[in-house]
Amino acid sequence: MSDNSLLSTGGFPAGDQYRGAMTQPIDPTDPTDSTEPLLEAALRTHTDYGVEKLEEADLATDPFAQFTAWLAEAAERGVYEPNAMVLGTIDPDGAPSIRTVLLRGVDERGFAFYTDYTSRKGRALQANPGVAAVFPWYTLHRQVKIFGAAQRVAPEDSEDYFSHRPRGAQLAAWSSDQSQPIASRAALEQKVVDTEHRFADADPVPRPERWGGFRIVPERVEFWQGRTSRLHDRLLFHREGAGWRVERLQP
């Protein structure tokens, strides 16, 4: 399989042993059925990137224009959930935390997403606004890494976004005390039923006060393009006053 075909199909070369092992599902109840060959093959998987490059002359003048171009290309080339980003935060007690969220807006102000302000990430961002995020577009051999500070979006922005969510998602925002323990799935589903009754005549469902958006205001944005022999292209935008400075990082 060529590198070009990998990009079009989203595949990863893992060797005959890895591909062969994947054809037979592992039975965890069978003591003779071991995951060791599959695990060993997975740990030794190596893909040599290098189909595409990223040169300084190719960059847009600011990271937002460059990001939107790459995001549109990721969508066009079939990346699953191209707006999914891995978000790292620091809890009020200083412990790190990480999860995947969906990007819902990008412009010259920053990168916006929405959540429950009382969730673990909501409480973390309000205590420690420093944040890092990465868009892992594996099948394109690309990453975008963002470093900055999070701030709440304007209430009217949260209102507008919430009003356009599917009704089920609106009800879920009221029903779930995000990140808090619950006795069972049945208990969660009963909360949804209760919320449906509460807002049976409401269209749209109003936004809970505890729910809204954050915007990551970046100080640095790195664009990473995989290259052959692990000599990747890494171009980093640094905020400088009202503009941006670009530097190349060693891989």
Image (cartoon, grey):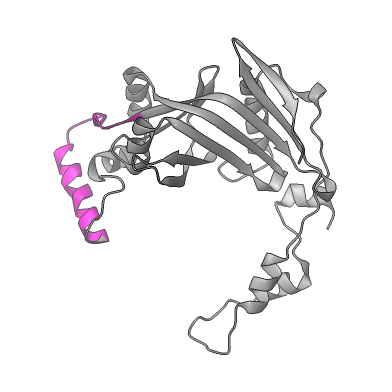
The correct choice, above or below, for 81 with respect to 210 in the image is: below
**As drawn, is 177 to the left or to the right of 243?**
left
User: Can you name the residue that lies furthest to the top here?
Assistant: 242
**As drawn, is 227 to the left or to the right of 71?**
right
Asked whether residue 72 appears in the rendered view, the answer is no
Q: Nearer the viewer, residue 162 or 44?
A: 44
Asked whether residue 214 appears in the rendered view, the answer is yes
**As drawn, is 175 to the left or to the right of 56?**
left
User: Can you name the residue that lies furthest to the front here?
Assistant: 94
Instruction: Tell me which residue sits at (38%, 28%) in the image.
Output: 213
- Image location of residue 248, percent across then percent down: 76, 29
**How many labels were placed on the picture?**
0
Instruction: Tell me which residue sits at (53%, 81%) in the image.
Output: 27
- Image location of residue 112, percent across then percent down: 46, 27
Quadrant location of residue 94? top left
Q: Nearer the viewer, residue 59 or 247?
A: 247
Instruction: Tell me which residue sits at (66%, 73%) in the image.
Output: 38
Quadrant location of residue 227? top right
The correct choice, above or below, for 247 with respect to 249 in the image is: above
- Read off the magenta span: 185-212
The correct choice, above or below, for 35 with respect to 15 in the image is: below
Q: Is residue 178 magenta?
A: no
Q: Is residue 199 magenta?
A: yes
Instruction: Tell me which residue sits at (26%, 40%) in the image.
Output: 171
Q: Quadrant of the C terminus?
A: top right
- Image location of residue 140, percent across then percent down: 71, 43
The correct choice, above or below, for 152 with respect to 50 in the image is: above
Q: Nearer the viewer, residue 10 or 144?
A: 144
Q: Quadrant of the N terminus?
A: bottom right
- Image location of residue 96, percent across then percent down: 44, 45
